[in-house]
Amino acid sequence: MSETKTTLTDAVHDLLRKAIIEQALKPGMRLPEDTVGEQFGVSRTIVRHALVRLEHEGLVVTRRNRGAFVAEPSRDEAQHVFEVRRCLENDVIRLLCERMPGSGYDRLEAHVRQEEAVKGKDGPVSIRLAGEFHVLLAELTGNPVLTRYVSEVVLRCSLIMSLYARSHSSDCAVDEHSQVIAAIRAGDAQRAIEIMEHHLGAVAGRAALSAQPDSIQSILSHYGKELAQ
Amino acid sequence: MSETKTTLTDAVHDLLRKAIIEQALKPGMRLPEDTVGEQFGVSRTIVRHALVRLEHEGLVVTRRNRGAFVAEPSRDEAQHVFEVRRCLENDVIRLLCERMPGSGYDRLEAHVRQEEAVKGKDGPVSIRLAGEFHVLLAELTGNPVLTRYVSEVVLRCSLIMSLYARSHSSDCAVDEHSQVIAAIRAGDAQRAIEIMEHHLGAVAGRAALSAQPDSIQSILSHYGKELAQ
DNA sequence: CGCAAGCAAATTGTATCCAATTGACCACCA
DNA sequence: TGGTGGTCAATTGGATACAATTTGCTTGCG
């Protein structure tokens, strides 16, 4: 366990991801390989590998010979991500109602307490914790594959919310988290799923409903395809 | 559209993936970077990037300073992949019952016809087509995120089946594919999901039930962790 | 004054090169 | 004989160097 699994690539990968999620790197921002590289004191090779992974995760997009950019999910993409997220998280709930591990509730409640602790002061930490609650749920299913996918969509949702949401402070209402836990504990999968649906719906809603007819670039990008090049 | 999106990395990536799925590269086989590189006539850098992606997709695993190997999913892992696959594919069905695009049935039926054409002569092509049917279903939802995930788990399932299944010829019963289409066309989501569950259950079953108490290395690998190094 | 061609800077795509870690083989010793 | 330590080959981790492509600007012409 003590083996330092962190190859440099992993480190850069994590750092960039965190920076993106915390909005230090804003959507659309360019990520030149050597700039990032010298910033972290590593060579382009490393940065490149990290960027490849991030692209796979949907947090950055790369254009041929143009470089990497922090992803700017369109509303359509956002819709798609949320759709998958609902599907996955519903299944998480369903599985947890069948097989919640022993220490599960303790860990969940500990997490919620942590969320409540930083409730007032919003900001990066609260956003991160909100996401991690959902990842923790996935982890408790004991299914690493499911966990990875949930993790990915949650991260993308964070990015999406940073683009489209009006207010971040209440992205994940902590009490809804508690309600989900309670419903699972009661073994009431149906209700837990309903709460989760409502929970995610609310989050997605804050993004979708703020649909001032899309920012100009978003609209134009839609038409721009036709005259690309 | 004509832009040759294929950077060399993409090409190698695709080639390796295809080779793995078609079992030209068998699970557990080593993939030394320079060997692969000189085989394809590219440098290690390229192979490296391709391997990073394949690892992300779960088709290869890499051990620090040891290199890359074609993944050998344990039965546990296999279980996890199938669990996620069922979740995702059920959602695909559900979505398609709501919004099947106009040309959808044509494309599906064309595909099934293709499958029937090569039905007798099993082999790589039939395996590939069977997988692509499920990917095609996902594509028809119009959700690229969902499509990518389905695509990934389907590929991993192909790998898994190549490890654990006794007979490949009937991995995906073509008539079950037809039944799914029919159920969706009837708008009967419940029935379509049932068929799909049964369909996937049968596939997974062929793997899981052949559970001669696991090959020796599989068992030992379970205990081996403790004395790893 | 607007537009097109062309040039220069910047950045990615790819290859090669060095260093560090690993695993294996072999000799040596209790 | 079994275990231990050391040296060596092999292979990856990482950095640097070169080539190709794109971009934006400049310049010249209509």
Image (cartoon, coloured by chain):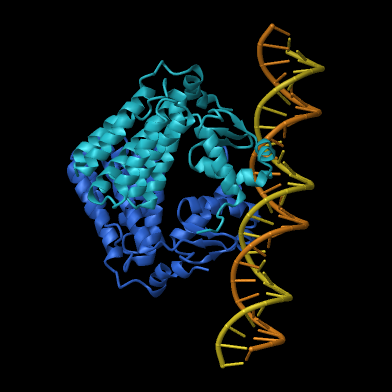
Chain colours: A blue, B cyan, C yellow, D orange
Q: Position of residue B80 (x, y in %)?
A: 38, 34
Image-quadrant location for residue B150:
top left
The one nearer the camera, B25 or A43, is B25
The one nearer the camera, A225 or A107, is A225
The one nearer the camera, A113 or D20, is D20
Residue drawn at (59%, 52%) of the image:
B7
Image-quadrant location for residue B91:
top left
Residue drawn at (58%, 50%) of the image:
A49
Residue drawn at (32%, 37%) of the image:
B86
Q: Position of residue A128 (x, y in %)?
A: 39, 56
In this rendering, the count of numbered labels is 0
Q: Position of residue B60 (x, y in %)?
A: 53, 36
- Is residue B218 positioned above or below A225 on the image? above
Asked whether, in this view, residue B16 is left or right of residue B39, the answer is left
Question: Could you tell me if residue B131 is visible in this image?
Answer: yes
Asked whether, in this view, residue A148 is left or right of residue B186, the answer is right
